[in-house]
Image: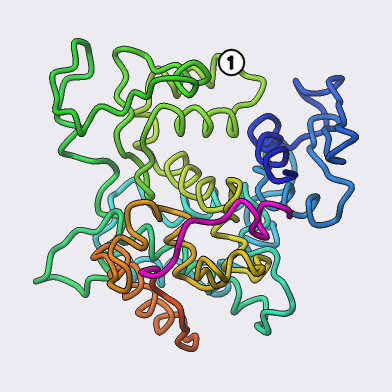
Amino acid sequence: MKTVFVTALLAAAVYSFEDGVWSGHDWFDEDEKVGVKNGVPYGLDPESDRRIKSATLHSGPGTKNDDKENVRMIMEVFGEEDYEHLFPLHDKLYTYEAFIVAAGLFPMFCGEDDPTLGLTSAEVCKRELATLFSHIIYETNGGEPDHHEYFRQGLKHIKDHHCGKYPKYPPFDGPAECNFHSHGWSAKTWPPYEHAQYFARGPLMMKWNYNYGRFADAVYPGYPKDKMNIMMNPENLESGILGFLSALWIYMTPRSPMPSMHEIATGFYKPNEHDELSQIFPAFGATTNVFNGNKECNVEFGTESDAAYHRAQIYLDLLNFFNLHPEYHLGCSKMGPFPEEGSASHA
């Protein structure tokens, strides 16, 4: 399926620049019509090309951050004062500037939308922010009922403090729920280091050695020493810009047969009959299914899990915060997994 190749392509060459370590290593797959030219992945099919570029992290010399179109859009609809109001408990590392810098490296975040959604570009950007922040707020919530509303307690934590209290160096003597060293093919592809602990870190609490490895591939393709630095020192994610980059990478990257959360929020994901049989609709509930559906969706048919319920409630609060209309299909209690025959498998 084309999405499998597109996803692999993003992992292999997601740092987009025309003069660097990938220059001179062009390739093209005739069957799937996707390839890499001067380090820039592309697709001949318009939708595949859009999908690749949408999830591509851009860096290198060039435009100043506040001159980037998507950054200007974000700053227009969500300024620093708004940020401080929404995140009054944020960790000192999670500054507005760190978020803006990270967002500027994903120019399609608040930078594209499907016209059939029927919203202005500013409204779609607000919808993207509401979607991303809903999951961030749930994952990093301060849980302090006497201080602020629940939806205004996000970005309080930069890591799982329960797992983070155990010594870094082996032998690891923490509980099993803090050991995120995988086995099998993923451990061979992204080998965990014995002394490194890949527990949850960042605004979306990324965990497991294979996720750290895929993220390192995306941020530092062709730079093995830098990639190794993340794998050997996963605590590097306990920072502002790199932490926000990990959250945006999770949000922007499709994983076959699932679309990205970005594609759902911007209207590009259009379910087909197979998706509809799985009760999957192009709404916020589907982003929970993408993010953690195997644990939070269809756990008990017809009854929302606590996590999915709270994510949906945060989203409703954020729609109000951004002056957007209420929406439907916010939960995922009846959703099945994304089917192999679904529309995201053939995009």
Magenta residues, dominant SS class: loop
Q: Look at 58% across and 60% down and name the residue there.
A: 262
Please provide percent x and percent y for residue 50.
77, 55
Please provide percent x and percent y for residue 146.
9, 71
The front one of 178 and 166 is 178
Judge from the rendering whether residue 278 lies leftward or rightward of residue 196; answer left or right. right
Judge from the rendering whether residue 49 lies leftward or rightward of residue 296; answer left or right. right
Magenta span: 332-347
Q: Look at 87% across and 51% down and name the residue there.
A: 45
Tell me the amino acid under the disc marked 1: Pro
Q: Is residue 310 visible?
A: yes
Q: Look at 37% across and 24% down and name the residue there.
A: 182
Say what secondary structure mark 1 lies in: helix
Compared to residue 178, the image places residue 276 above or below, namely below
Q: Look at 49% across and 27% down and name the residue there.
A: 213
Magenta stretch contains residue 95: no
The mark total stands at 1
Please provide percent x and percent y for residue 121.
67, 76
Answer few, some or many: residues within 10 Å of disc 1's Cα (few below 14, many 20 plus, some between 14 and 19): few
Identify the residue under disc 1: 224
The front one of 145 and 285 is 285
The front one of 83 and 271 is 271
Magenta stretch contains residue 335: yes
* Residue 115 placement: quadrant: bottom right
